[in-house]
Image (spheres, rainbow, N blue to C red):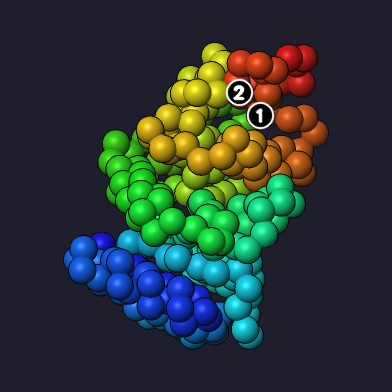
């Protein structure tokens, strides 16, 4: 697995190298945002470990450029010193796929990275175009559109959308969504809520009615009209 580490704390970088390199990981690193963006543009990585607070170009801005200007779908694990819901929402809105709050366990970081990469690699198989009402999703090209307008989602957002579209109009239980996204290693209870919020921002916010509905105490579903529930 080839990883890009974008982190300005030399102690954290040294710990990551010391833990991951002996396991066979190939690592590149940058100590500031612009350097990290340049490496991401020049090379293909299996995943990016990205600090939020970086000199020059912060992690949120970098992730936005990675998704927008560079059109890279590389999984991004964001590191943050803050764990408020607003911080997590900002990270996912910028295009991150997962997050860890400092200080973090190196073992947990590796587990999260493996899950992100496994999900990214698996998502390239079984290409099909899914359609639910005015929503379409090409699972081969990762192009999702509502009413003809493209949606910008995180890798996890695409995973959740695919699951909901395949099940529509049925309700998908929360536990099934968590299993699809994280397998047997779900993070804290806020994580899925944050991902659903980010998906809803892109899928529903500019449109006349919301397609993504939360069924209280059960899970989530997609609807094709402005129905209740």
Q: Relative to 214, say whether 48 is above or below.
A: below
Q: Nearer the viewer, residue 180 or 82?
A: 82
- Indicate the quadrant containing the N terminus: top left, top right, bottom left or bottom right: bottom left
- Quick one: label 1, few (<14), some, or many (20+) residues within 10 Å? some
Q: Are marks 1 and 2 in contact (CB under 8 Å)?
A: yes
Left of 215 or right of it: where is 164?
Answer: left
Q: Position of residue 201 (x, y in %)?
A: 70, 44
Secondary structure of residue under mark 2: strand
- Give the x, y percent position of residue 70: 49, 71
Residue 137 visible in this rendered orientation of the protein: no
Q: Residue 220, position in %: x, y?
A: 61, 23
Looking at the image, which residue is at 41% across and 37% down? 185
In the image, 88: left or right of 111? right
109 vs 160, nearest the viewer: 109
Apparent side of residue 218 relative to residue 16 in the rendered image (left or right) = right
Return the disc, 1 or 2, that comes first in the chain's sequence: 1
Residue at point 45%, 78% (across, down):
11
In the image, 66 versus 17, the foreground residue is: 17
Per the model, the C-alpha gap separating discs 1 and 2 is 7 Å
Which residue is label 2 attached to?
A: 220
Q: Position of residue 162 (x, y in %)?
A: 47, 33
Element under label 1? strand
* Vertical relation: 12 (above or below) 104: below
* Dot in front, 1 or 2: 2
Residue in the image at 60% along x and 62% along y = 80
Q: Going 45% across and 65% down the picture, which residue do you hit?
A: 49
Residue 102 in view (yes/no): yes
Location of mark 1 (residue): 212
Label 2 crowd (10 A; few <14 / some 14-19 / many >=20): many
Query: Is 227 displayed left or right of 175 in the figure?
Result: right
Q: Quadrant of residue 96?
A: bottom right
């Amino acid at each position: 697995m080839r990883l890009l580490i974008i982190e300005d704390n030399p102690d954290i970088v040294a710990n990551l190298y010391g833990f991951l390199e002996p396991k066979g990981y190939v690592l590149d690193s940058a100590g500031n945002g612009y350097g990290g963006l340049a490496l991401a543009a020049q090379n293909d990585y299996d995943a990016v470990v990205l600090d939020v607070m970086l000199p020059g170009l912060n992690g949120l801005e970098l992730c936005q450029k990675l998704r927008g200007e560079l059109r890279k779908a590389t999984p991004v694990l964001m590191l943050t010193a803050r764990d408020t819901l607003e911080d997590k929402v900002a990270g996912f809105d910028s295009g991150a796929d997962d997050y860890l709050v400092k200080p973090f366990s190196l073992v947990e970081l590796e587990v999260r990275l493996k899950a992100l990469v496994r999900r990214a690699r698996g998502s390239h198989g079984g290409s099909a175009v899914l359609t639910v009402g005015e929503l379409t999703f090409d699972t081969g090209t990762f192009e999702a559109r509502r009413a003809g307008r493209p949606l910008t989602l995180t890798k996890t957002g695409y995973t959740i959308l695919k699951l909901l579209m395949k099940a529509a109009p049925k309700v998908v239980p929360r536990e099934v969504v968590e299993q699809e996204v994280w397998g047997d290693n779900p993070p804290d209870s806020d994580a899925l809520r944050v991902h659903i919020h980010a998906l809803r921002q892109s899928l529903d916010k500019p449109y006349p009615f919301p397609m993504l509905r939360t069924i209280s105490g059960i899970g989530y579903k997609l609807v094709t009209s402005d129905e209740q529930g």
